[in-house]
Image (spheres, rainbow, N blue to C red):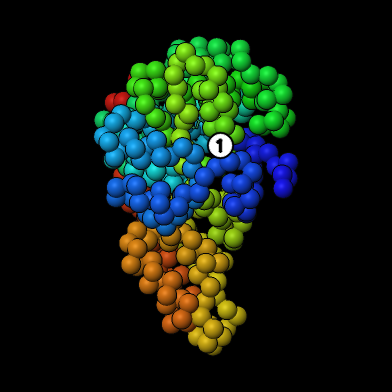
Amino acid sequence: MKSNVVIDPWGSILLQDYAQLMGEFGMQHFDRGMLERFPNPNMLMRRFVVFGHRSLSFIADAIGKEKDFTILTGIMPSGDRLHFGTKSVIDMVRYFQEQGGETHVLVADLEALATRGVELDVAKQRFKEFYLPAYLALGLDPKKTDFYFQSENETVKNMAYEFSSRITMNEFRAVYGNMDASRIMSSLLQAADILHVQLKTPGPTVVPVGIDQDPHLRLARDIADRFGKYKFLPPAATYHKFTPSLDGGFKMSKSKPGSYIAIPDDPETAGKKMLHALTGGRNTVEEQKKLGGEPDKCMIFEMYKQHLLTNDRDLNEVHETCRNGTLTCGEDKARACGLMKKFLEGFNRKFEKAKKTSGKMVE
Ligand code: TRP
């Protein structure tokens, strides 16, 4: 049954029921069959943290046949910290980059100007000083990644104008709910971001994003259909689960400082936050030993799965020993605290190093 849900890419959405979402919006499950078509899948894929996709078989085909494909994602330069969810996006971009895709990462400075009032020069400064080195620290290869600003890309801006000729207000409303002029401009621009890479490099494009960006993908796919002269392939996408906040809320929320860890964050403080995370533990140690814990309800386990424990065997062992009651929350939290500290310290180190490269990349 349709529930009139619209996803608002500019609002904050709380998503609990991924299955319902897939049914309503016609996404496909990222299942074992799809997983097996990819060489050396990364941990987000192996663990099905990537849960949905659109048209991903185009990309599997291109990789299998060593044909050209492009990867594109974008960021709004609206702060000076990243969510762990953004790390998931970059992990996916990096995976496809390693499989030979031509990579484009755009700075959505026009969208940030129109929807959040961020001035263009401020956006540029933030990109140079923070986002670019942060993305390199998370593993994007500077030699293989094309970064661009929306405001400086004439092709993208012209295409956005052209796209406006074949879309009605009713279609906008059907995809996004209520729209205003700034959102209309931004969504056309985003469709142009997504599709313009096929002009130079014909072939499929994959857009790794958070699920909140799916309306933009639907619009871009509709538009691809309508402009036959360009022979666009409908863009593919991967969707990964949110990284929940440590208290079990579905979106890492900056308004809850005690349960929110950003990248970067002070490693010491962040480690301590792990000690207060919601776990799947029982009320008493005795009960825990008798009944075992519930790792699938545990935020620490979720952080292990999505970000902190890269080895599958280690992850399975935690799952197993938690469930059979031999692992207690106390000892596990101490480990999680250490892993978080290590991750953030590693990030800081790589960030400082990346700054030296990135300084030369943007004038
Ligand atoms: N709308 C995205 C955000 O909110 C940024 C963005 C602009 C983007 N163009 C894109 C993302 C193209 C993916 C693909 O951050």
Q: Is mark 1 within 8 Å of ligand 1?
A: yes
Q: Name the element at disc 1.
A: helix
Q: Report the residue at 61% width, 29% height from top.
A: 116
Percent position (x, y) of residue 316? 39, 69
Percent position (x, y) of residue 157? 50, 14
Looking at the image, residue 359 lies above or below residue 196: below
Percent position (x, y) of residue 149? 44, 22
Q: Report the residue at 36% width, 40% height from top.
A: 60
Q: Report the residue at 33% width, 67% height from top.
A: 313
Q: Specify whether 65 is left or right of 125.
A: left
In terms of depth relative to the viewer, which is nearer, 83 or 175?
175
Query: Which amino acid is tagged 1?
Result: Gln
In terms of depth relative to the viewer, which is nearer, 109 or 187?
187
Residue on which the image places disc 1: 213
Residue 111 visible (yes or no): no
Q: Specify whether 76 is left or right of 178.
A: left
Q: Report the residue at 52% width, 42% height from top.
A: 210
Looking at the image, residue 302 lies above or below residue 79: below
Q: Where on the picture, by quarter, is residue 201? A: top left
Looking at the image, residue 285 lies above or below residue 217: below
Residue 8 visible (yes or no): yes
